[in-house]
Image (spheres, rainbow, N blue to C red):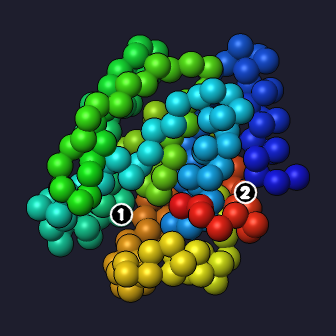
């Protein structure tokens, strides 16, 4: 059973019990998180909140900040704009971070329903994980991930090798170990545009 089918079964079981599901879908870059989140969103008509919208700007990426596991994520803003209203079950808006302009974009409206998907690396950060009640880590062999990254963005591929992958590794080793997830599932190796 692939990750999509497995999660559909798990979500259906929880929804049938009358539970709402706040799915954290974490994992290293190019492991299939974005593609899986999109499939689940389409199947359940569920909103997706992307961690890519909550990176800290370059001005805040100090050596001290980046030395912290998951320091690349703006957990302070995520807590205020997502976690608090999500746990209250109310509609809310958040402004996505735009890397090109190093600014916040137009607000994105979120109406919580039976399923909300929190997708991206750092989503299971200890300062963020209370937003979810089903925590899943996707895995993928490193060679496949590197091939995807190189095809997806050859200009930035070297920075993945020297900066972003080491930061993710620090996060998974020190902040989001395997036992902090409910399930660890293999990503779909047939996908080629995953994040």
> Residue 71 in the image: x percent, y percent?
29, 60
Q: CA distance from mark 2 to mark 1?
A: 22 Å
- 109, above or below 66, in the image: above
> Which residue is painted at 61% across and 44% down in the image?
38
Packing grade of label 1 (10 A; few <14, some 14-19, many >=20) is many
- 177, above or below 85, in the image: below
Dot 1 falls on a residue whose secondary structure is loop
User: As drawn, is 119 to the left or to the right of 73?
Assistant: right
> Which residue is painted at 76% across and 16% down in the image?
17
User: As drawn, is 128 to the left or to the right of 5?
Assistant: left
Nearer mark to the viewer, of 2 and 1: 2
**In the rendered view of the protein, which quadrant contains the C terminus?**
bottom right
Confirm whether residue 47 shows in the render: yes
The disc placed on residue 6 is: none
The disc placed on residue 185 is: 2
> Residue 3 in the image: x percent, y percent?
76, 51
> Residue 72 in the image: x percent, y percent?
30, 60
């Amino acid at each position: 059973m692939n990750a999509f089918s497995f999660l559909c079964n798990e979500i259906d079981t929880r929804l049938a019990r009358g539970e709402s599901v706040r799915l954290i879908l974490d994992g290293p870059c190019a492991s299939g998180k974005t593609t899986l989140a999109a499939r689940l969103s389409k199947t359940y008509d569920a909103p997706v909140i992307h961690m890519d919208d909550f990176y800290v700007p370059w001005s805040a990426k100090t050596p001290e900040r980046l030395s912290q596991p998951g320091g690349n994520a703006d957990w302070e803003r995520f807590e205020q704009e997502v976690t608090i209203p999500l746990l209250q079950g109310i509609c809310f808006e958040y402004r996505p971070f735009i890397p090109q302009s190093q600014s916040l974009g137009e607000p994105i409206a979120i109406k919580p329903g039976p399923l909300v998907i929190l997708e991206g690396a750092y989503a299971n950060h200890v300062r963020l994980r209370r937003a979810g009640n089903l925590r899943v880590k996707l895995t993928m062999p490193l060679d496949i991930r590197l091939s995807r990254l190189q095809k997806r963005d050859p200009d930035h591929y070297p920075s993945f090798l020297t900066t972003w992958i080491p930061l993710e590794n620090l996060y998974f080793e020190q902040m989001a170990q395997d036992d902090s997830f409910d399930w660890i599932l293999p990503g779909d190796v047939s996908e080629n545009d995953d994040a």
